[in-house]
Image (cartoon, rainbow, N blue to C red):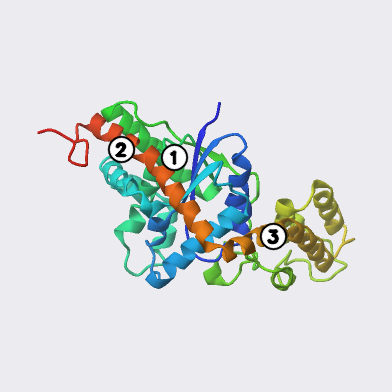
Amino acid sequence: MAQRIFSGIQPSGEVHIGNYVGALRNWARLMSQDDCVYALVDYHAITIPYEPAEMQHRLGEAAVAVLAAGVDPARAILFVQSEVPEHTELAWILGTLTTIGALERMTQYKEKAEQQQNQVLGLFAYPVLQAADILLYKGEVVPVGEDQVQHLELSREIARKFNAAFGPVFPEPQHLLTQTPRIMGVDGKTKMSKSRGNTIAMLDTPAASWEKLRTAVTDENRKRRSDPGNPDVCNVFTMHKAFSPAADIARVDRECRSAEIGCVDCKKLLHQHMTAELDPVRERADTLVRHPERVREILADGARRALAIARPVMAEVRQAMGLRAGNGAGAL
C-alpha cells in the first residue's frame, strides 16, 4: 500500500552533490512506489538574512535542480511552500502545543543560533513549521539525513499531543534515512556549504567539478604516494560510496590500504563515475533553463494540487479544535 511521503528543500542557492545524493536522488527513486509531495520551503529559507531580489531566482534554481534530478511532476507534487498559506496557519496551531523546552533542545537551533548575533523567533520555531509542513499532508514517511532525525522526533511528539487533545487527525510521521553516507565539503572537515566555498555543484561541468575534486582533502595522514591510506577517514572514499559501483568501491578500499592506488588516481576514478551520473542531470537542467515557462507551469500546478490536500486537512483541524470553518463559512 502506498504511503504519503513529504520532503522539502530550501531554495538556498546552488544545489551541490551533497543535496543530490542526500535528498534529490532519493526523491526520484521514491516516486516508483509511494505518494510523494515535495516542497521548495522558502519560508524556512527566510529565517536567515537574504536578498529579496534573489529569492525568485533561487526558487527557479531549486525547481530546476529537483526536476533535473529525476522528479517527475506527473508522478509527484512539486510546489512552493509560501503558495499554500495553510502551512503557516497550522504552524501557529501546533506552536500552541509545543513547549519552549522542546525547542531549546534542538541541536540545529543551538548551532545556528551561535552564528547569529540577534537570534530570531523564526529560527527558534523552525521545527514547528517543519512539523506543520509534514502534518498538513498527513505525511507518513519523511526521507531525511541523520541531522534531521531529532526534528522528526519532535514532529511525532507534536502529532501525538494534537491527537490526544483533539482527536486522531494526524499520523505520526516516521523518518526514512538515506543509505548514502553524509558527504562533507571538499575540505573534508565541514558540511558542504556554498558560503564556505567547499562544494561541488550538482550542475558543474566535468571540468569545473574536476578542478574542485582535484584539490579535495583525502586521508591527511597519507603524506606520500607509497604510504598506505585509510579509506575510513577519507571523504573522497565517502563520495565513491555515493557514486561508484560496488566493484570499484571495493577496489579503492583495498588498493588504498595497500598503497596500490594513489589519491590522484582515486579521484580520477571517482570523477569518471560522477560525470557518468551527473551528465544526464545537467542536460535535463539545460533544457529546463531554456524553457522557464514550463518550470512555472509545473510549480503552479503543484500548488493547486497541494492546496487540494491542505485545505480539507485544515478544515478537519479546525473542526476538531472547535474553530470556525474559515472563509466566513462558520455560524455564530
Q: Which residue is tagged 1? A: 153
Q: Spot the residue most to the right.
A: 260
- Identify residue type, mark 1: Glu
Residue ID for mark 3 = 235
Q: Is residue 132 above or below residue 83?
A: above
Instruction: Give the number of the mark in front: 3 or 2.
Output: 2
Q: Residue at x 19, y 31 (%)?
A: 322
Give percent across and percent down for residue 126.
Answer: 37, 52
Lower position in the chain sequence, tag 3 or tag 2:
3
Viewer-nearest of discs 2 and 1: 2
Q: The residue tagged with tag 2: helix, strand or loop?
A: helix
Secondary structure of the residue carrying tag 1 is helix
The numbered mark, 1 or 3, whose residue comes first in the sequence reads 1
Circles 3 and 2: CB atoms closer than 8 Å: no
User: In the rendered image, which residue does mark 2 sit on?
Assistant: 314
- Residue 81: where, in percent of width, then height? 40, 52
Residue at 34 percent across and 26 percent down: it is 168
